[in-house]
Amino acid sequence: MGGGRLLIYGANGYTGALVARYAAERGLDPILAGRSAAAVDAVARKHGFDVRIFGLDVPSTLDANLDGVGCVLHCAGPFSRTSKPMVDACLRSRVHYLDVTGELEVFEATARRHSEAEAAGVMLMPGCGFDVVPSDCLALHVASLVPGAKRLELAFRGVGGGMSHGTATTMVESLPKGSWVRRGGKLEKVRPGSLTRKVDFGRGPTLAMAIPWGDLGTAWRSTGIPDITVYTAADRAVVTGAWVMGWVPRVVGSKPVQAFMKRRVDGRPAGPTDEQLESGVSLLWARAENDQGLAAESRLTGPQGYKLTALASLNIAEKVLRGELVTGYQTPATAYGADLVLEIEGVTRDDVLRPE
């Protein structure tokens, strides 16, 4: 099933507006949508795009605004609050669903709707941006090099560029939830800051800390590897801070502390500047290993994270609108293969260890 128009929801946020900008540069004609008429209109006027203004609270309103839409690219987070009503509407209206989340709980919740999506002839694919296209593709790549791989480690590092309000807010809300790994195919909770390792992203060893990233859901479904840990580069102070906060989750999750941290987020720049978008880079690393000691390691370098998100999500959206898709819940790699990420300009992959 193909056809229909692309609708970008949350187009007034930093990521949504950036996606709209790159859509215009690619000659696309999406519909921009969101709750705030003034904010969405301001983005749409720059590019001459159509606008639809609606919230996510009333199902009938949602359904009406998906009329003529073939694919939704959902950019309004935190997705733990916003993805379900949009997924519900997409299933009712038989519209394909994409988003740019990195939230583990969203991947797990959406994966549970695989049968519904297949019955509706719809593809559900959360994580079409930096979260998790490069890491998902890299995971499948290293897994393909190691017969019977049982352990997978993934790590990422951003060099240059800042963080959007939406991403920072999501991180603040996630702090009280602790950290996770996958062991024996099951998600297992671990204390934040308790798992660290050194990772060489190609610029020398860097300290990295395990985090509850979406790949714990996607990489497991893409590779079938039962033991997965995901790391991000972090200095010693960040690791120590995570460890301390792990002892006081109720305090970190309390309304006053959450409100304080969100006020700090609101005082930050909306996201990376254009200069940071162009000069920043994303660095990723992956290692797969089996019980016989065979291992493979690969590195991937790509554009700054938000730029990569815009390019990757639009690449997938264009495929969907052409009818190039697999129904049901999919990860980027299950639907399009390990080399999907290599279609993005500026992305390179390097195997640094292959099984002998």
Image: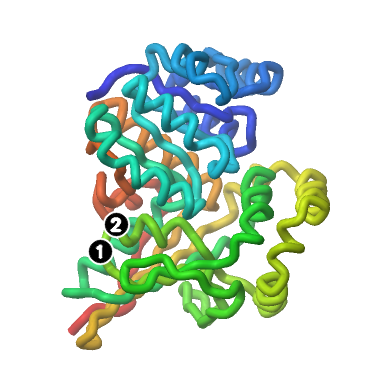
Image disc number at residue 7: none
In the image, 235 versus 356, the foreground residue is 235
Q: Secondary structure at mark 2?
A: helix
Q: Residue shown at 27%/53% (left/top)?
A: 339
Badge 2, how many Cα within 10 Å: few under 14, some, many 20+? some
Residue 229 position, x and y percent, is: 43, 71
Residue 254 position, x and y percent, is: 76, 56
The residue that mark 2 highlights is 221
Task: Reply above or below: 39 against 315.
Answer: above
The residue that mark 1 highlights is 224
Callout 1 touching callout 2 (CB < 8 Å): yes
Q: Residue shown at 55%/14% (left/top)?
A: 52
Residue 234 position, x and y percent, is: 62, 72
How many numbered discs?
Answer: 2
Q: Quadrant of the N terminus?
A: top left
Amino acid tagged 2: Arg
Could you tell whether 203 is left or right of 13 in the image?
Answer: left
Q: Residue shown at 53%/79% (left/top)?
A: 195
Could you tell whether 117 is left or right of 201 in the image?
Answer: left
Give the residue at the far bottom of this rendering: 293
Q: Give the colour scheme of this rendering.
A: rainbow
